[in-house]
Image (cartoon, rainbow, N blue to C red):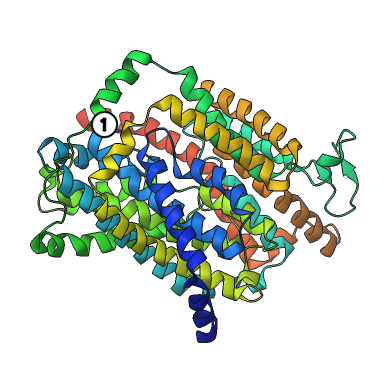
């Protein structure tokens, strides 16, 4: 993108309305991330349809602020009550809560804010540097490559199946079948519409996301509600706001920062892998940092370095996930899956067109991500001690607010009550999936990528006159095919390795 495009994007972002929505997103995201049980995915799913009332730049200002802030603020609950506010905050509880018990809660919260912002800024800079070249490479992609890309994205069902591959594949197939509802992408023939005109355009993706990650989660929390445990947690959440100093010393910053930069870069790469989220990145970075640390014995017992590594990793994922989404149209995680739906609703399609026809808006999104990290850095440091009060909100109050926002958001999408019905059905499905331990990730992947898979496969076969060799003869599609095969075979390889390990140990002992 040219200098003129970046200047135009920067001029757009200094408008008061954009700054207001960015601050609003950071404020909402901080509250959502700090509340255990809520997540950045839920927040984005609920707020996305509401942003359709705004201009695209104002809507994405709110979403970028919410996403970045929600990931960082998940560390607040992890530090103060040893309960990760978001999945990406898992490893922050290892050292953060130990620091809090040592009377260093303010320092832990300050480190969380500072290094989360550092991780986010580094990953966003990587997005700015590498997204354009990757997008230019996709110019060579035709229907064959896009089909294999969609299939590769669907192969990530294995990664998001939570250890139960069979359940994941079954649920993923359900999502693909639902994506077939509506008009045939080639012949425009009605399919599975059951005479309902509302189904001609297919199952809308956003209401399904709102239902599964919003009301579905609320229903599951109500189902598992334990009043005695809830009262106990409520007492624990009434934390002492005298948390001590907030900012780390210059010496601590100098010793920690280089490792955190490496952690942020590693998390960016991990985030670019479809289905690899902040939880995976933070675990990998924290574990490897412990191996090379000068004081590994402190990790898990109140290590400032360990907390900083985790903080830089969880927000470092965001830039990588956005790179995959904006250049290839493949969601890096569940949030970017929703953002693809948002771009589609605005008439934009991830890929090279984002960097040619919509270059100015793409630059605006990237700059908004930079600004979001700066805003939550300032906001987070100013409200470190006050933010602890967010944890004292009663769960029923949260459930009621989330439910209302879900219904309003689903209806606001198209001003259509049918979307509310879809959302409620998805909520029941999401609740049942959780109760019976079925992963929701494969279902969302199937629904999102099913249409891309079918339409591009049929176009590729038309162009090749029905020859399936087109999927092997083209270099990019052949490489993707190899990756897909490796992905599907990886669980079998792991099983074989695990079975051989005991035998090897017995032979060694003999």
Q: What element carries label 1?
A: helix
Q: Quadrant of the C terminus?
A: top left
Taking the spot 29% from the left edge, 60% from the top edge, the residue there is: 378
Residue 439 can be seen, yes or no: no
Is 273 situated left or right of 199 in this image?
A: left
The total number of labels drawn is 1
Residue 113 can be seen, yes or no: yes
Is 357 situated left or right of 390 in this image?
A: right
**Crowdedness near tag 1: few (<14), some (14–19) or many (≥20) residues, C-alpha within 10 Å:** few
Between 142 and 312, the residue placed more toward the observer is: 312
Taking the spot 17% from the left edge, 35% from the top edge, the residue there is: 240
Is 205 situated left or right of 433 in this image?
A: right
Between 186 and 2, the residue placed more toward the observer is: 2
How far across and down, in percent of the image, does residue 369 sit? Answer: 44, 63
Taking the spot 16% from the left edge, 39% from the top edge, the residue there is: 100
Residue beneath label 1, please? Answer: 505
How far across and down, in percent of the image, does residue 421 sit? Answer: 71, 32
Residue 472 sits above or below residue 93 on the image:
below
Residue 133 sits above or below residue 452 on the image:
below
Is 41 situated left or right of 411 in this image?
A: left
């Amino acid at each position: 993108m040219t200098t003129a495009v970046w200047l135009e994007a920067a001029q757009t972002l200094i408008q008061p309305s954009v700054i207001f929505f960015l601050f609003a997103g950071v404020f909402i995201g901080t509250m959502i991330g700090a509340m255990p049980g809520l997540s950045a995915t839920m927040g984005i799913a609920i707020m996305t349809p509401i942003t359709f009332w705004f201009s695209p730049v104002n809507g994405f200002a709110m979403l970028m602020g919410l996403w970045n802030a929600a990931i960082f603020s998940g560390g607040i609950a992890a530090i103060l009550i040893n309960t990760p506010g978001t999945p990406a905050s898992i490893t922050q509880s290892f050292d953060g809560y130990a620091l809090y018990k040592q009377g260093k809660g303010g320092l832990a919260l300050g480190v969380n804010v500072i290094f989360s912002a550092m991780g986010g800024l580094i990953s966003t800079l990587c997005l700015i540097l590498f997204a354009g070249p990757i997008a230019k490479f996709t110019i060579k992609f035709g229907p064959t490559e896009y089909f294999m890309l969609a299939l590769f994205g669907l192969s990530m069902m294995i990664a998001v199946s939570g250890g139960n591959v069979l359940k994941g594949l079954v649920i993923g197939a359900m999502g693909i079948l639902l994506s077939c509802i509506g008009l045939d992408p080639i012949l425009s023939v009605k399919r599975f519409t059951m005479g309902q005109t509302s189904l001609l355009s297919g199952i809308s993706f956003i209401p399904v996301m709102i239902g599964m990650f919003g009301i579905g989660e609320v229903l599951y929390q109500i189902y598992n509600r334990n009043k005695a445990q809830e009262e106990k947690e409520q007492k624990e959440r009434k934390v002492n706001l005298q948390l001590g100093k907030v900012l780390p010393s210059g010496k601590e910053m100098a010793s920690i920062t280089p490792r955190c930069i490496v952690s942020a870069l590693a998390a960016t790469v991990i985030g670019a892998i479809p289905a690899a989220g902040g939880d995976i990145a933070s675990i990998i970075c924290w574990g490897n940092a412990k191996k090379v640390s000068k004081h590994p014995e402190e990790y898990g017992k109140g290590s400032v370095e360990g907390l900083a590594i985790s903080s830089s990793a969880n927000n470092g994922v965001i830039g990588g996930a956005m790179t995959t989404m904006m250049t290839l149209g493949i969601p890096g995680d569940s949030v970017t899956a929703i953002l693809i739906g948002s771009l589609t609703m605005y008439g934009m399609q991830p890929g090279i067109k984002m960097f040619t026809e919509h270059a100015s808006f793409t630059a605006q999104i990237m700059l908004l991500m930079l600004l979001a990290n700066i805003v939550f850095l300032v906001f987070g440091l100013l409200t470190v001690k006050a933010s602890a009060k967010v944890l004292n909100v009663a769960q029923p109050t949260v459930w009621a607010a989330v439910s209302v926002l879900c219904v309003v958001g689903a209806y606001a999408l198209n001003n259509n009550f049918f979307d509310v019905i879809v959302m409620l059905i998805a909520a029941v499905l999401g609740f049942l999936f959780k109760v019976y331990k079925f992963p929701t990730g494969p279902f969302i992947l199937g629904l999102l990528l099913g249409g891309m898979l079918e339409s591009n496969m049929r176009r590729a076969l038309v162009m090749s006159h029905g020859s399936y060799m087109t999927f092997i003869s083209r270099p990019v599609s052949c490489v993707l095919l190899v990756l897909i095969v490796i992905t599907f075979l990886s669980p079998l390889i792991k099983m074989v390795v695990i079975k051989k390990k005991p035998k090897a140990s017995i032979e060694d002992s003999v």
